[in-house]
Image: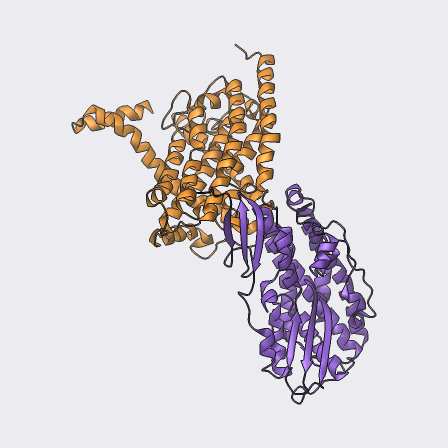
Chain colours: A orange, B purple
Amino acid sequence: MNYLYFLYMDFLAKYNVPKILGNITFYIIPFCIIAAVLLVVVLILVLAERKLLGYFTQRKGPNRVGYWGVLQTLADAFKLLIKENITPGKADRFLYNLAPILVFVPVVTVLGIIPYSGEFTFVNTSTNIILYVVLAAFPVLSIFLAGWSSNNKYSLLGAARSISQVLSYELPITFVVLSIVVLASSMNLSGITLAQYSSKGLAGWFIFPCIAGFCIMFISILAELNRCPFDLPEAESELICGYNTEYSGMRFALFYLSEYSMLFANSLFLSIIFLGGYLSPFGGYLSHIIFGDSQLASFLVYFEQTFWLFLKSGIIIFVIIWIRATLPRLASYDLIKFSWVVLLPASIINLLWVIVYKYLTGGAA
Amino acid sequence: MTAVKTFKLNLGPQHPSTHGVLRLILELDGEKILSCEPDVGYLHRGMEKMAEQMKYVQYLPTVDRIDYLAGCFYSELFCRTIEKAMGVEIPDKVKYIRVLLLELNRIASHLLWIGAFLMDLGATSPFFYAFREREMILRYFEKLTGQRMMYNYFVFGGVRTDINYLEDIENIIDILPQKIKDYEKIITDNPIFLTRTEGKGIIEQTLAKNYSITGVNLRASGVSYDQRLYDRLYNNIEFVPIVLDGKDSWSRYKARILEINESIKIIQQALEKVKQLGDLRQVLINPIRLKLPEGEYYSEIEAPRGLASCYILSDGSDKPYRLKWRTPSYYSVNLLREILRGAYLNDAIAIAGSLDIILPEVDK
C-alpha cells in the first residue's frame, strides 16, 4: 500500500499537482474502485441467488438472457435504470430522495476497511473493527428515512420493524465482536486475521474456541441484513415490499444494490473474524507449495489470499441463500423475544467463556 | 386536539397475499389489530342472476368458474340438482368416475392451498413443490377433458366421454404419498412453522357453528361433520373423515395433509370399481329440451373448502326462476372479523391464509 502511495505521489509530482491534493485524492480513488467492483459483485450475487433458488425449487432460474442466464441481472439493472422515478404526491421530497443515496455510502465505506489480502487494505486504521460494527448498522437509518418519507403505511410499518430489529440484534453482535477482540488482542481486522494464523492451517481459527459466538453472529447478521427468516421489514405477504414499497427505478435499484452489498460485506466480515480471513486452510499457501520460494510465488500469494477470503464468504452466502429457500418467516414479536431472551444472554456467556479460555491458554497479559 | 393512537390500514383489494381481491379494513394499534372489517364483492360476476337469463345447458359451462380451483365440485353440484329434479338415478360407473375426478380435484385444491399458505408464512420452496405435484393432476385433467381448470366434463345424467388414461391416475397415486411425506419433513415439525401456527387463529366450536363454518376448518375444530358420509355418490366407498381438535392454524394444515391421504385411498377404491365395471352406459337428459318441473330443488356437496350447495326455484320453464349458491369461503371470510381481533398483523395473514379463502368463490 505504501509503495502504491509513493508511486501515486511521484506521478502527481510530475505534473506539478500540490501534495495536499494528492493526499486527499489518494483515499478517494479506492472507494471509486470499490463502487465499480461492487456493481460486478452484486450482479454476480443476484444471479447466484436466483440460480440457486431456482435449483432448490426444481426450476432452472434465469436461463434466457445470455448463456446460462449470465446477462439476466445486467438486463434487469438496465431496465431499472431507464424506468421512471415516481415520487408519491405527499412524500417528503428531500428525505425521500436522500434515503437511497444515504443507504449506499456506509456500504462502500465498510468494504474499504476489509483486508482482502496481506498487503491489500484500502483504509487501515488501528480500531477498524469498531468502525465496521458502527457502519454496518448505519443503513437502517436510511431505511427509516425511506419508510418515513414515503408517506405510506406499509413503508412506515416496515421501517418500524427494521428499527426494532436492528436495535435488538446489534447488542449480541457487539458482544461477540468483543469476544473476538479479547481472543485476538487486537481491534484491527488485519491483526485479527494474523492472530488466527497457525502452522496447522485452520486449527487457529477463532470459530473453534468461539463456536457459540459464530452461531450468534450468523443469526444476528441474518437479522441485520433482513434476510430470511428475519425478512420482516420487507415481508412480501404482509407489507408488500416494506420500506421500499414506493420506490421505483434507480432509487429502488440503489436499495437493492446496498442490500446485496451488505450481504457481501457481512459475509466477508464473518469469514475474517471467525474463519481466518485470507489465511489458507492448509497452513502453507498453495503458491508456495507449487512454485517454491520464487518471486512468482510471493506475488501469487496475494491473489491466493483474496481467493481464500472470497471462497469462505461465498460458502457463507450459499448457506444464507439455502436458509432462504427452506425456512418460513418468524413473527415480529418472536423475533424481538428471541434476541433478548436467547441471543443476548448467550452472547454474554460466550464473552465470559472466551475470557476464561484466553486466561487458561496463557494469552492474558 | 386528541392524540392519534390507532390507524386504519386498507389491506387490499390489491395485495400480494389476499388470494384474489379481498379488502380488509384493519384498525391497528402498532401492529396489533383492534378490529377487522372484510369488504367483499370485487370479483362479483353475477353468477346467480346470470342463471336466470340462460338455459340450464348454457349455464353449465360457467359453473366451473365459481371456484376455479375446484371446478368439478360445482359442475357436479349443478348436475346433481338437475338430476334430482328430473328424478334420474345415474349408473354406478358414472358415479365412480365422478368420485374419482372429484377427489383428484380436491387433492389439487389442497396442494395449492399448502403452497399458498406457506407462501403467506414466507417460505417459498413448498409453493413450487406443491405446484409440481398439482401439475401432474392438471396434466391428467387436460388429457381427459381438454382443460386444466374449467373442465365442463360432467353433464346432466352422466359424463361427457368415457374415462381414459387410467394408468396416469395410478402413477399419480403412486407418487403422491411419498411427496406428501417430503412436505411433512420440511414443514410439519419446522420450529418456525410451529411458532407461527400453533395456537394461532383459534376457532372455538360454538364460534364455528355460529358462523356456519364447514369443511376442513370445522373438522379441525373438533366437529365431526363431513357431507361425504351422507352422500350417495360415496355409498360403497370406505373412508374416515379427518377430525382434529387443535382448533388452530396448525390443525387446519395437518387436517388438509391427512385429507389428501384419505382422498388417495378413495381414488384407489374408485379406480378399482371403474375398472371392474364395463362399458359406460348413461341415462343422459336431453339438455336442449330440458325443462325442470315447477318446484324447489336443493342439493349439497362437500367441496374442498366446505359445504357447497345449490338451490333452484323453477317455474316450469327452461330457465331457473331463481338460482342460489352456497359457497363455503364466504362464511370463512366473515369469520375473519372475529378471529383477527387481537392478533398481530403478520399473524393476520397467516390466519386468513389458513382458512383457505378463494375470492371468486366468495363473490360469485
**Residue at (45%, 20%) from the top-left corner?**
A187
Residue A79 point in image, percent of width and height: 37, 54
Residue A138 point in image, percent of width and height: 42, 33
Left-right relation of A173 to B164: left
Left-right relation of A266 to B229: left
Residue B158 showing in the rendered view: no
Residue with the most extreme left position: A16
Residue with the most extreme bottom position: B289
Residue B104 showing in the rendered view: yes
Residue A49 point in image, percent of width and height: 50, 46
Q: Which of the 4 quarters of the picture holds residue B297?
A: bottom right
Which residue occupies the foreground of this view, B96 or B250?
B250
**Residue at (38%, 42%) from the top-left corner?**
A39
Quadrant showing the N terminus of chain A: top left
Left-right relation of A309 to B84: left
Residue with the most extreme top position: A365
Residue with the most extreme front position: B1
Left-right relation of B73 to A71: right
Residue B284 point in image, percent of width and height: 72, 84
Question: Against B295, is A260 above or below?
Answer: above
Which residue occupies the foreground of this view, B220 or A6?
B220
Count of numbered circles on the image: 0
Question: Against B254, is A286 above or below?
Answer: above
Which residue occupies the foreground of this view, B298 or A15?
B298
Question: Against B241, is A142 above or below?
Answer: above
